[in-house]
Image (spheres, grey):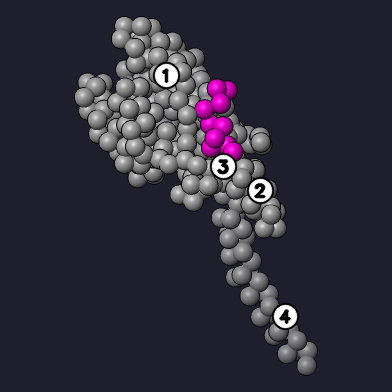
Amino acid sequence: MIKNLLRTLMRWFLSALFILPQLVMAGNDGLQCESEVPLSFTKQEMAEAGFEPGGFTPFFLGMIVGPRIGLEWNDGRNVRTIEVLRALPYAGNLVGLFLCVEALSGYRMTSVAGETGIDDWRREIYFKRIHKAEEAGDFARAAHLRECSPFDTYNHPANKQTVKPDESTGLAKWRSGLSGFFIDNRVGLEREESRGIRTVEYWSILWLPRIFPAIDAAQGETMSDIVREEHLDTEWLKNDADNESTQKGVTQ
């Protein structure tokens, strides 16, 4: 009888050695922040909020204001008045200089969007997603979404400049400012978040190639989809994985 009990205990012990690590790994996977990839909404969420991506507006913004601005419009991100003024002949160059300084000063797109309110519509939909989880009784999911909110400047993405000094000084800093001036101010601001620059955006310096991202925007393509397809956020995702001391915060 004692032998049988010992065998049973040994089987339980060996089973635990195999099963528990799997459970821990599964738990860690479930806690990964969704903000580690660009935020996107389902068509149903957009339709419920009365937003229809694509059409003339993002095409116009992509051609006249900036190639990335039109695509981000389809993500629900609004446009700033100063960004539209940049399209003015001659005077727009002065506006462009101001926007160039914005990136040179270390501002990031997440911070600018939060301060100017151009992400309010997206923020509202995101927190509706949280409220739905709460209404369904999934409080763990709701708490997780709050913690990983991409509208929290600590989360999307974290400040990589604290671990990448080469990105905050010298040529890397000027790359952000000059790309913001010659291409699209959001390219510069998102370069500060270590987001890559597309080849078609480099060519858009010649203006005419802007028609390609503008057509994509008119067809409803979003910047978040392009970021995934072209792996534009690979650099800051890698930096985030290397930085275990990244500070987290929660905003609503």
Q: CA distance from mark 4 to mark 3?
A: 52 Å
Q: Does residue 120 show up magenta in the picture?
A: yes
Distance from Cα at disc 1 to Cα at disc 3: 24 Å
Quadrant of the snapshot with the N terminus: bottom right
Query: Is 122 or 245 nearer to us in this picture?
Result: 122
Residue type at numbered disc 2: His
Q: Is residue 180 left or right of residue 9?
A: left
What distance separates the C-alpha of mark 1 from that of mark 4?
69 Å
Pointer 4 or 3: first along the chain: 4
Could you tell me which residue is drawn at 53 percent across and 31 percent down? 119
Image quadrant in which you'd find residue 82: top left
How much space separates mark 2 and mark 4, taking CA atoms?
Answer: 46 Å
Identified by mark 3, the residue type is: Ile
**Can you tell which mark lies on residue 9?**
4
Read off the residue under disc 2. 131
Q: Amino acid type of disc 1?
A: Glu
Residue 161 shows up from this direction? no
Q: Name the residue that disc number 3 marks.
A: 125
Residue range highlighted in magenta:
115-126
State which tag comes first along the sequence, 2 or 3.
3
Residue depicted at x 26% and y 25%? 204
Q: Which residue is mark 1?
A: 83
Secondary element under disc 3, as helix, strand or loop, is helix
